Structure formats: C-alpha cells, structure tokens
Amino acid sequence: MPKTGNCPRFSMKLELYVPIMLLVLFSGVSHSSQKWRESRGLVALWPQLQREKIESITFCCVDANELATRCNGYEELPKESSFRWRSDADIKTWPVKYSVPKANLPECVQIIDKGIDNPILCQCGIDERMLVVTPKGKYIVWAQTEIKDTNRPIVYGEDWGSYELGRFLAKYCVPDYEYKYSIPPKKDVIAIMLYPKEFSPPLALFGDKKLAEKLIFDPNVKDNPKGLIGLADLYKHGRVRTFGIETRKEKGKYVWDKELKTKKTFEGRQWLEKIMDAFEIAIKEAEEKEKYYPGSPISFNARVVFMTRDSECWKEIVISKSTIYDDYIKSEQLKAYFDELGLTKDLLNGTSNSSKQ
C-alpha cells in the first residue's frame, strides 16, 4: 500500500484552490442579494455597457421614502465614479416613467453615444434614475427626464445630456402626447430679427424697429419696495444680453446703448408678412407629413426671433445650400428671400454693420 501523510503537491494545490473557492462562494452570495450596481455618472461606465450588449433601458422615478432616508445618495456616492450595490427590493417601488421599446433600442443606444460625445451639461436632479440591463449585469445611473410640458424635451445626467434623446422618448414612449410647433400669429408680430449663431446684435430686422427697441430696452419691470432691490436692473441687463447687446460698466453699474445696430433694417410690414407667410406655409406642409416632436438641429447656424408686444419666440435654424430648416419645418422660399435680400452670406459670416433700407 502506498504511504499516507502530507503530500507537498496536494498541500500546495489546496493553498491555491481554497482562497479561490472562498472568493467565488462569497462573491456569488453578494451578487445574489445585491443585483444592481448604482452610480451617479454614465460616461465612465458607458463603454462597459456597450461591450456587454445592452438588452433594455428604462427610466424610473425614485420612491419618496428612498429620497428621505438615504441622504439623497450623495454621502454613499460622493463622486460620479462611485458606486453601490442595490437589491431588487430597493427598486421594486420605483414607478416606471419610460421604457424604451425593444425595436428602437439600437437607435436609443446610438443617441446616448452621441450625447456622451457632445454633452449638454445640466444640473442633474436626484429623483430619477436610468436602469440598464445587459446579459452580464444590471445598472442604475442617475438621469433626469423632461419630456412633457416643455417645448424642448431633454434627458441629462451628472456628466452628459441629450436633446435628441428627449425627442426620441417623446416620439416612442409618449406617442399620444401633443406637442405644438408654433410661432405667434402674424397680426401680433411687430418685428422679426435674424441673428447669426454667435453672440451678436441682430443682423436684420423686419417691422417696427422703434417699438422693438422700446420693448427690449425699456421693459415694464420695477423693484418691489418690500423685496430685494436691484432685481429689475439685473433682469434688464440679462434681457439686453439675450438680444446680443454689448454692455459695459460705468461707476459700478452696467450700461448699454439703447439702439439695435442692425446691418439691414426693413421697416414696415411688407417683408415681415412675407417672412411670416413662408413660415406658416412650411408649418402646414410639415404637419401634413408628420407629427411634431421637438428637438434641435445638430448644428444650427442662425436664429430667428418673432417679437410681439408681450413676448418673444426664438427659433434655431439651419441655412443650407437650397433651404432653411429647423427641427420640423423646411422652406426653400425662406432661403430664396434671404438670398434676394443679401442676408445669407452675412448670417453665415456673422457680420454686423448698420444700414437702413
């Protein structure tokens, strides 16, 4: 019979195998009770999710009790790259807001990919999450959705954001919700202004320049004597900057010239109404083709503002070789008008020198 006793080879194998077996055992126990990996940021995690092949994406609201009892997550997740394990029991009470249809999942993944490469950075809330499932794991990422009751749906997180994803959820997850592409009625518009993409005074104005200047430079706002003093001046400063007006500081206060230094001004309503008619025709044609889901051109190169006595409506547009378009309408007539008036080149170049026609 062979001798019994210590076998060096056997002992060495035990020394190697036992820790490995224990690691597998305990890691298996951990993952069976803590199935979801939650993190605040998406950018660092996204390549891993793509490698694992995403199977589903869902957007949820966090349960109110969760927000009240877990210190809003910031203490447990101090950094965007921090993570914690969560169980199914933790999220079973989270109401589902939007579930990406399986057929549209590849498009959704592509949109998120673009949103990460070209992020729109916003202040992320703490009451919503994005749930991502792959064959290898389940993941929770902080993400906020603003889809309804807005003229520009958006989805954003701690380190990324996408208007295109907002438009995607509006189109495929709430198809019955009605969005309205609108501009003010022609009779209410007192001026139309054209701007380049970059900060600048308006390059062209159609309509009543004097009234437009009064509405911009002399808004009917005053400080509340019982409130904070200075809010009216702060509002006026922000307003003139919105309209591309340079400001300067004199004696500790911001001041500005009360004049719209447009390169071209088309007084009266003739050209204003031609521009309005072209927009209205383009809107009607678009409505006959498809329902409106708000978005934003990938790279707009000009802006239009329709001004009434009570408000302003801004539109970001793209000037192409033969048309002018935005996230919904397309108009060859508008492009023809801009070419006829010598505006196209100036809008694309962003030049501004005053003249009147």
Image (tube, helix red, strand yellow):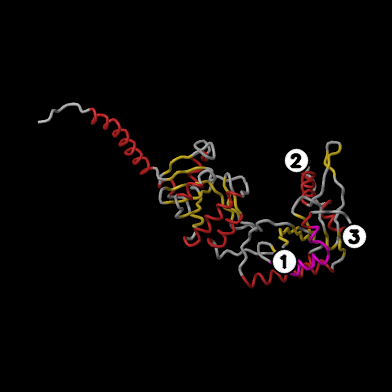
Mark nearest the camera among 3 and 2 is: 3
**Viewer-closest of 251 and 48:** 48
Residue bounds of the magenta highlight: 330-346
Could you say whether the residue bearing mark 2 is in a helix, strand or loop? Answer: loop
Q: Which residue is mark 3?
A: 356
Q: Which percent across, then down, holds residue 236?
A: 79, 47
- Residue at image mark 1: 323
Task: Specify whether residue 277 is painted magenta.
Answer: no
Q: Residues within 10 Å of mark 3 (few under 14, many from 20)?
A: few
Q: Which label's residue is closer to the chain start, 1 or 3?
A: 1
Crowd around label 1: few <14 · some 14–19 · many ≥20 (10 Å) = some
Marks 3 and 2 close (CB-CB < 8 Å): no
Q: Which residue position is annotated with label 2?
A: 228
- Residue 220 lies left or right of residue 159; in this view the side is right
Q: Main secondary structure of the magenta part?
A: helix
In the picture provided, is 205 more to the left or to the right than 60?
right
Looking at the image, is 70 positioned above or below residue 273?
above
Do the residues under discs 1 and 2 have CB atoms within 8 angstroms? no
Quadrant for the C terminus in the image: bottom right
In the shown orientation, is residue 18 left or right of residue 354? left
Residue 169: x and y in percent read: 55, 58
Figure quadrant of residue 191: bottom right
Residue density around tag 2, few if under 14, some if 14–19, many if 20 or more, within 10 Å: few
Sequence-first disc among 1 and 2? 2
Q: Amino acid at mark 2?
A: Leu
3D distance between C-alphas at marks 3 and 2: 41 Å
Q: Nearer the viewer, mark 1 or mark 2?
A: 1
Kind of residue sitting beneath label 3: Lys
- Of 194 and 349, which appears nearest the observer? 349
